[in-house]
Image: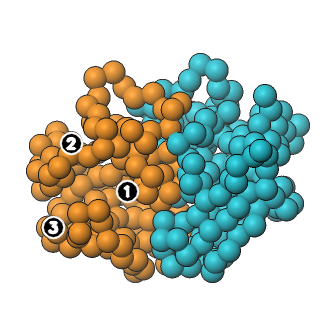
Amino acid sequence: MSEALAGGCQCGAVRFIVSGARPPVYACHCRECQKQSASAFALSVPVARDRLTLEGETATWERPSASGATTRCHFCPRCGTRLYHASSRNAERITIKGGAFDDTDWIAPQAHLWVSRKQGWMMLPDGAPTHETQPDDLSAWRDGLVGDWR
Amino acid sequence: MSETIAGGCLCGAVRYRVDSDAMPNCYACHCTDCQTQSGSAFGLQMPLFASMLAVDGELHKGERETADGVAVSYWACAKCGNRIYAENDARPGIVVLRAGTLDDSKTLVPRAHLWVKSRQPWITIPDDAILYEEQPESQGEWIEILGLGGADD
């Protein structure tokens, strides 16, 4: 698949397009991701920053990550929908929120992180790779996912 | 003795407490709005009487209208943007807490699943949950699926 993937926030003030092939998708069930999504897990879609074209301004909030890097979180200043994250550790790559795409039918996480925090009712697909916490080298792990983020 | 049911936003600027002896019921909504707002696969919603929710910290208020013309107000942390709860004109006196913001969110089990017709295909819904292709039509159905105000066991 090489058609552009479109998405945006809930109120429509921020819209985006991701060029190129479908990128990887993974789920994270950690407590922070449950809080941020206000749901059961986060869906993360890593892509190269230059594949993202944004229309509309985002507001940002920064937080330190467990590994000592800084994560800059971009959200719609009007409706608050979180759209993507950028880490100080990797200037080339961002992580888009999976639910922010207009069409989410293609979204199927190929791996699940922090299943030690998973809500008990959530059944994961048979054979999906899981991690009790997260891989030691998250960046290298992302490189190994099916579907190229670059 | 009941334990305190508490939660808050990601950055900690907003904290809240839910006045209830047992964890109230919640439901998952798989509509595309909830997918966008959560950035994930569904919203986890916990309706409460407004008097049950006590919030500390600065909130940003937003407003929007649903597809069928209901005015919705929602409150998010003014600093990190984390959505905390919403209210709508159709159900005065009820607030809908975004349940994933609870500190003890690991124990949540949605009693019902709404808008199943737009769920992401990889999601498996447990057999004992109540399913709606779209959403309940009457207040009575809402009350039945939610047992509003406390767990109904």
Q: Quadrant of the N terminus of chain A?
A: top left
- Contact (CB < 8 A) between labels 3 and 1? no
Which circle marks residue A90 in the picture?
3
Q: Distance of mark 3 from mark 1, alpha carbons?
A: 17 Å
- Sequence-wise first label, 3 or 2: 2
Q: Which of pointers 3 and 1 lies earlier in the amino acid sequence?
A: 3
Report helix, strand or loop for mark 2: loop
Numbered badge on residue B98: none
Tags 3 and 2 in contact by the CB under 8 Å rule? no
Camera-nearest label, 3 or 2: 3
Query: From what the image shows, is residue B21 above or below residue B51?
Result: above
In the picture, one chain is orange; tell me its letter. A
B134 on left or right of A24? right
Residue at 79% of width from left, 56% of height from top?
A: B19
Pointer 1 residue: A97
Please name the residue shown 70% across and 61% down the image. Answer: B17
Coordinates of residue A16 in the picture (x, y in percent): 35, 65
Q: Relative to A21, is A79 above or below?
A: below
| Residue with the mark numbered 2 | A1
Residue B23 appears in which quarter of the rendering? top right
Q: x, y (%) of residue B78?
A: 56, 79
Chain containing the residue with disc 3? A
Q: Earlier in the sequence, mark 2 or mark 1?
A: 2
Q: Viewer-nearest of labels 2 and 1?
A: 1
